[in-house]
Image (cartoon, helix red, strand yellow):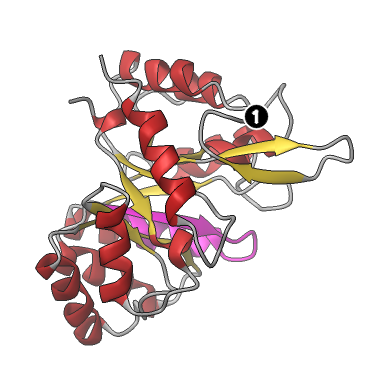
Amino acid sequence: MSAALDYGVQSFCFRHFKDNAEVAQKVKDIGLDKIEVCAVHADFNDPQGWKGHVKTYEDAGVSVVSIGVQTFTGQESDRDFFECAAIAGAKHISCHFGIETYMKAIPQVRQWSREFGIRVGIHCHGGYHFGGQPNVIKHLIGLGGPEVGLCIDTAWAMQIGPRQGNPVQWAKDFAGQVYGVHYKDFTFGTDGMWEDTVVGEGNLDLKAFVAALEENSFDGMAVIEYEADVENPVPALKNCVEAMRALVG
């Protein structure tokens, strides 16, 4: 199976549920066994406490493949994020950098990435967020690579507009630098506002995106993400999994 089709789920989908044992069961309920854990479900500045959460997932047969999305701010305490990822055996951290602190934070992140053997993917988060558009992403990767690459969130990539925010083109333009993927889909209204939908049912050309990842030797972390139906996300997430499985073969 290609890395593009070896995916888990983002724990933010289950943000209404704070008990990690319950979250782990929901991961299994949608037919998956991997998760990227976000700060809703863990304090990543408490590595000792995090060990208990990792065991909860392990006991349920769910592996933690990434943590994030974490914001690196240039604080020495940011090293805890790498320690937590290492405790889980994860090889990826999804991250943001801030415009005020990225010049200090990126050298630290490169050092910790080498120390722990963990890659970092900059999570694009739309036009309103620093690091949301390709020119800024290229600049940040230029400062931080090869330890720092890109985590393509397909929905947020599209939010900046079709000319610059085409996830299929990003998979090609950032070939070899895509370390993570969030499979997420939006539809857009005439006012530019977005609405979550099952992956592949909105503006994302899911088949072409996966093909572009595979053609460009993607070897990173992948998760599906659906942010709507907060109190009952399992049915839509099952549909996301079905949409992804339909691409196999």
Q: Is residue 209 magenta?
A: no
Decide which of 16, 159 is in the foreground and name it: 16
Residue 47 percent coordinates (x, y): 24, 81
Taking the spot 36% from the left edge, 81% from the top edge, the residue there is 43
Q: Callout 1, which amino acid? A: Gly
Q: Which residues are magenta?
A: 92-110
Please determine whether, in this image, residue 180 is positioned above or below residue 243: below
The residue carrying mark 1 is 165
Please determine whether, in this image, residue 167 is positioned above or below residue 214: below
Decide which of 242, 151 is in the foreground and name it: 242
Taking the spot 40% from the left edge, 79% from the top edge, the residue there is 18
Specify whether residue 180 is in view.
no
Please determine whether, in this image, residue 154 is positioned above or below residue 110: above
Decide which of 170, 226 is in the foreground and name it: 226
Taking the spot 59% from the left edge, 55% from the top edge, the residue there is 228
**In which quarter of the view is residue 132 placed?**
top right
Residue at the far right: name it: 191
Q: Which element carries disc 1, helix, strand or loop?
A: loop
State the quadrant of the C terminus: top left
Q: Is residue 107 magenta?
A: yes
* Mark 1 crowdedness (10 Å alpha carbons): few <14, some 14-19, many ≥20: many
Number of residue marks: 1
Residue 114 percent coordinates (x, y): 22, 53
Residue 6 percent coordinates (x, y): 24, 35
**In which quarter of the view is residue 245 placed?**
top left
